[in-house]
Image (cartoon, helix red, strand yellow):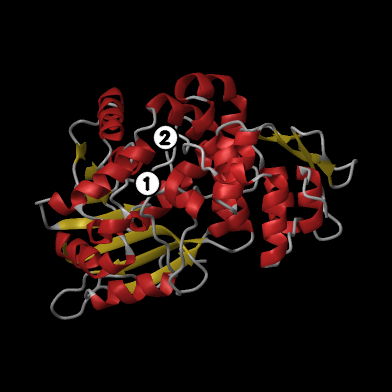
C-alpha cells in the first residue's frame, strides 16, 4: 500500500465480498458494484473527519445530518430501503491495528481533528461526570424538551391528524394510520374496562390522544400529564376544540407531582422508556398508589426481546432519546409484581410498530419540503433515519412493544378481573 490512499481504496480494503452498496467520494474514488441501487456519497473532507473521529453509527450519522454524506437512490424522508440493505447485507471486516494505522496515515492524519458536532446532538458537557443526575426531574424535563418540543407543526405533518406518537394497532393490513391509532386507544380503554363516570390518569400523555379518546368515547373523566410544554398547549387547544373541557384535562407536569389518588384506571403509553430501569420500583409503586382497590394499570412500552442491560446506541442516545433505556417485558412484569400489582395479561404487538413507523416515514416524505422549512434539513434527516432504522429493528425482533395489564387488588385479593375478557382471542 502506498503512503497515499483514496477513500475508495480504504473502503474497498475493508469490505467483505458481495457488497450491495456503491460508495463514492469527493476525491473521485469509488468502491462497490457499479450497478448497485443505493449509493453512499461522501461529499467533503469534513464528512471524512466525522467518520474517522467517531467510527460506527455516530460518525456516519454526524456526516449525514450535516449533509456531508448522501444516500443516493432513496428519499431522505424514508431511507428504509437503503438502511435495510446496509443493516442486513453490508459487512465490514475489522482491520488489524497496523492496517488501521496505515489507512489513517494514507487518508491524512489531519482528518483526525474532530469537527464541531451537529447542533441536533444532545450531550450536556456535565452528563458523563454526573450520571447520578439521570432521571432527576430537572434532567428529565431537559431531555423531554429536546425530543418533544421540536415543533407541533412538524409533528402534525409526520404523525398525522391523530397526533399520536406511539405504536398503532392495525386490525387489518389495509387500515389507515388514523384508524390504527384509534384502534390502539380503544383496545387500551377496553383493557382498562373504562365506564362512564370513572376517573383515568394518563401519565406521559403526549398531545392528549388517550385522554380525549377516553373522554369522548367512554365518558371518562380523564387527567393527562406531560413534561412537554408544547404538547400540553396543543392538547388543551384540542380539548377545547372538541368540547371536552368538562371531562378531559392535560397539565404540564411531571407524573411524580400528581397529587390526586383513587383513580379507577391508569394508562402509561410510551413513558416507561424514559424513566430508567432502576426507577421501575418507585414508578410502579407510585402508579399503584394512584389506583383505588380494584383499579387497573395498562403499561404500553417499547421493550427488548431479552432482559439483559443493553446500551441504546450513540445515535439514539444523542439525537433521539437522551437517557432512554429499554429492557425486556420480564423485567417490567417483575417490577409491577414487586410493587404489589397483579399482572393479568401481557401482549407483544411489535409488528404493528413497524407498520406505524412506515406510515410516519411516508408522511415525512410526502411533507418533506414543509418539514425542512419548519425544523431545518438536519433535524428532518435525523427523523428520517431514526424512524426507518427503528422500523428495521422492530421487523428484525431487535426491539418489541409490550402491553402489561395489572390490577391493584383489594384487601381480600379480589381483582374484579373477568374470567375471559372480550379482547383476548
Relative to the observer, which residue lies in front, 246 or 298?
298
Q: Nearer the viewer, mark 1 or mark 2?
A: 1
**Could you classify mark 1 by the number of other residues whose Cα lies within 10 Å: few (under 14), some (14-19), or many (20 or more)?**
some
Could you say which quadrant of the image residue 7 lies in? top right
Which is more N-terminal, label 2 or label 1? Answer: 1
Q: Is residue 171 visible?
A: no
Q: Is residue 148 visible?
A: yes
Image location of residue 120, percent across then percent down: 44, 36
Left or right placement of residue 283 versus residue 351 in this view = left
Image location of residue 140, percent across then percent down: 26, 49
Image location of residue 84, percent across then percent down: 70, 50
Residue in the picture at 81% in, 33% down = 28
Q: Mark 1 points at which residue?
A: 123
Q: Mark 2 points at which residue?
A: 163
Residue in the picture at 17% in, 55% down = 263
Please determine whether, in this image, residue 425 is positioned above or below residue 264.
Answer: below
Amino acid at each position: 500500500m502506498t503512503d497515499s490512499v483514496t477513500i475508495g481504496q480504504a473502503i474497498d480494503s475493508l469490505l467483505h465480498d458481495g457488497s450491495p452498496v456503491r460508495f463514492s467520494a469527493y476525491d473521485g474514488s469509488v468502491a462497490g458494484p457499479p450497478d448497485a441501487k443505493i449509493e453512499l456519497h461522501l461529499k467533503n473532507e469534513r464528512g471524512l473527519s466525522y467518520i474517522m473521529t467517531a467510527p460506527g453509527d455516530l460518525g456516519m450519522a454526524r456526516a449525514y445530518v450535516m449533509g456531508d454524506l448522501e444516500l443516493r437512490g432513496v428519499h431522505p424522508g424514508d431511507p428504509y430501503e437503503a438502511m435495510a440493505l446496509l443493516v442486513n447485507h453490508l459487512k465490514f471486516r475489522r482491520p488489524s491495528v497496523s492496517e488501521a494505522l496505515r489507512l489513517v496515515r494514507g487518508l491524512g492524519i489531519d482528518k483526525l481533528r474532530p469537527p464541531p458536532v451537529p447542533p441536533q446532538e444532545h450531550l450536556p458537557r456535565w452528563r458523563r461526570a454526573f450520571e447520578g443526575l439521570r432521571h432527576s426531574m430537572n434532567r428529565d424535563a431537559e431531555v423531554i424538551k429536546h425530543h418533544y418540543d421540536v415543533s407541533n407543526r412538524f409533528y402534525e405533518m409526520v404523525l398525522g391528524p391523530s397526533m399520536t406518537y406511539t405504536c398503532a394497532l392495525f386490525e387489518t393490513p389495509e387500515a389507515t394510520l388514523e384508524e390504527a391509532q384509534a384502534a390502539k386507544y380503544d383496545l387500551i380503554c377496553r383493557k382498562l374496562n373504562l365506564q362512564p363516570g370513572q376517573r383515568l390518569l394518563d401519565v406521559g400523555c403526549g398531545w392528549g390522544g388517550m385522554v380525549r379518546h377516553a373522554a369522548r368515547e367512554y365518558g371518562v373523566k380523564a387527567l393527562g400529564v406531560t413534561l412537554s410544554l408544547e404538547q400540553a398547549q396543543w392538547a388543551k387547544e384540542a380539548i377545547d376544540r372538541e368540547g371536552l373541557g368538562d371531562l378531559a384535562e392535560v397539565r404540564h407536569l411531571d407524573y411524580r407531582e400528581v397529587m390526586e389518588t383513587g383513580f379507577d384506571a391508569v394508562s402509561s403509553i410510551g413513558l416507561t422508556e424514559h424513566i430508567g430501569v432502576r426507577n421501575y420500583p418507585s414508578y410502579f409503586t407510585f402508579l399503584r398508589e394512584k389506583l383505588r382497590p380494584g383499579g387497573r394499570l395498562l403499561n404500553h412500552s417499547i421493550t427488548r426481546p431479552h432482559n439483559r442491560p443493553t446500551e441504546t446506541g450513540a445515535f439514539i442516545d444523542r439525537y433521539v432519546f437522551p437517557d432512554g433505556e429499554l429492557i425486556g417485558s420480564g423485567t417490567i412484569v417483575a417490577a409491577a409484581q414487586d410493587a404489589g400489582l397483579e399482572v393479568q395479561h401481557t401482549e407483544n404487538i411489535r409488528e404493528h410498530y413497524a407498520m406505524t413507523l412506515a406510515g410516519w416515514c411516508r408522511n415525512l416524505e410526502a411533507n418533506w419540503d414543509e418539514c425542512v422549512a419548519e425544523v431545518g434539513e438536519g433535524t428532518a434527516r435525523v427523523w428520517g433515519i431514526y424512524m426507518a432504522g427503528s422500523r428495521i429493528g422492530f421487523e428484525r425482533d431487535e426491539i418489541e412493544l409490550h402491553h402489561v395489564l395489572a390490577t391493584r387488588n383489594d384487601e381480600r385479593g379480589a381483582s374484579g378481573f373477568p374470567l375471559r375478557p372480550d379482547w383476548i382471542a
